[in-house]
Image: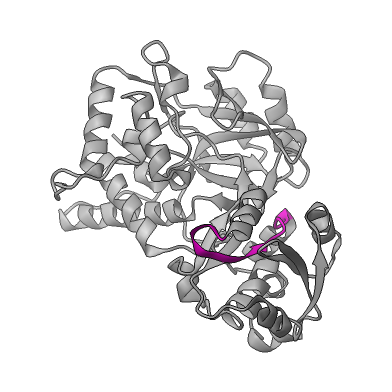
Amino acid sequence: MSSIFPFPGWRYDHGKVDIRKILAPPYDVIDECEQERLYARDDKNVIRLTLGRKQENDSPYDNRYTRAASHLDTWRSNGLFLQDRPSVYLYEQEFSSGGREYVRRGFLARVRLSEWGHEGIHPHEKTLSGPKQDRLELMRATRGNLEPIFGLLADPKGEVASMLAMLVDYEPCLNVRDDAEVKNRIWVVDDQELIHRLLSLMPTPEIFIADGHHRYETALAYQTEIRRKMRAAGQVPPLRGDLDCDYILMLIVPDSDPGLVIRPTHRMVYGLPDFAPAKFLAACEKNFIVAPTVRHKLESELEANELPCFGFAYEDKLFILLLRNRHPMEELFPAAPEAWKALDVSILHALVMDELLGIDEGKLLRKENIIYSNNLDETLMRTKSGDNGVQCGFILRATPMRQIRNIAEAGAVMPQKSTYFYPKPLSGTVFYLFW
């Protein structure tokens, strides 16, 4: 039985807002400067819901979460939002990456929650308690999903991707170019026959979470909390699937889509006492072939290697570290899935970050001594200049979809910041509310 369903989404009334001014990136890619810029852009910008400001006088009764709930309630009461009939929402993004043009298509729907590995829902990255507590407080206050998570649908025959391409042949309800120069288009599909035809292509869907692991686990916690409260009040909770909170809003993209782009996430290291690059490189030679390279060859040489490898940068010098053999990973992690032990990022974290630099898993999770970036030029520039104390950088290749699928199917998870699916879906396009 399918776990994917249409839902009566809520959307901004385009006649009452400038739609270009009220959308925002997902909350977890917004820093303080971007938050302030979005606040100033429009007093109805969705940032006030998804990532409200903290204030010095915040209390349990007046804080970023209660203010988000108040905005949501007021805006809906004032007719700023319209509600659709039960629908799915086709979502197309046209963008450039690496000098090429892409079009990626998916659809927004609600997906029935289940524990990881059940009913075809698979994670691929670790989660942290802090972000989950933050999102849980927001969900408690607003009682809904304010932005979608991102799931990849197994589509081995390309049937779902083909049908989505056929459905985008009329005027979209939303057509916006965002700040990253990505063209975003959305179509409301409320024809129940069309919805049935689309969903019948995935009767038992397999979905790999691309972005939104924290929000998915938060939704599970909220679902459990609501049902526990019902029992405490003497009520018998209905069957799973009968409550709105039994579902989560998800952008579902077929993994066969030719516009599916995964970018690498590079690492910059700072704050290491007595870090000596020459000594470090000599230590690397135990497990890696260390080969010097130059900027214009770096990416092509990394991609040409079949064995696990990554780049290393300090000052204006560049090297490629190529794993000599898999024995060290086998010795350290004999019970780990082979797919996990073959990952560039697993090898980097185990054999270099932890073993040679003393940056263990705890420090990585707390983001101590490490800065992440999806921009190669930024990583190299900051490494060369020593910006904010950066001592060196590690350049990763993008993790291919087959490795992500292998990791998920093996029941393993990748280190945090192992993948960066580009572009992100905009927030503020469609809301899934429980009230």
Counting from the top left corner in percent of width and height, residue 266 is at 62, 58
Counting from the top left corner in percent of width and height, residue 359 is at 52, 76
Left or right: 295, with 70 as reference point: right
Q: Residue furthest bottom?
A: 331
Is-magenta flag for residue 396? yes
Left or right: 130, with 88 as reference point: left
Q: Nearer the viewer, residue 299 or 239?
A: 299
Q: Say which quadrant the C terminus sits in.
A: top left
Q: Is residue 46 visible?
A: no
Q: Relative to 275, does residue 401 appear above or below in the rendering?
A: above
Q: Nearer the viewer, residue 35 or 184?
A: 35
Residue in the picture at 42% in, 63% down: 128
Q: Relative to 355, does residue 391 appear above or below in the rendering?
A: above
Marks counted in the figure total 0
The colour scheme of the drawn protein is one colour
Q: Nearer the viewer, residue 138 or 35?
A: 35
Residue in the picture at 32% in, 34% down: 48
Counting from the top left corner in percent of width and height, residue 245 is at 35, 45
Counting from the top left corner in percent of width and height, residue 268 is at 58, 63
Q: Is residue 263 visible?
A: yes
Is-magenta flag for residue 383? no
Q: Which of the 4 quarters of the picture holds residue 287?
A: bottom right
Q: Which of the 4 quarters of the picture holds residue 290?
A: bottom right
Q: Relative to 87, does residue 244 appear above or below in the rendering?
A: below
Q: Nearer the viewer, residue 218 or 197?
A: 218
The magenta stretch is 386-401
Residue in the picture at 35% in, 50% down: 135
Q: Residue furthest top?
A: 15
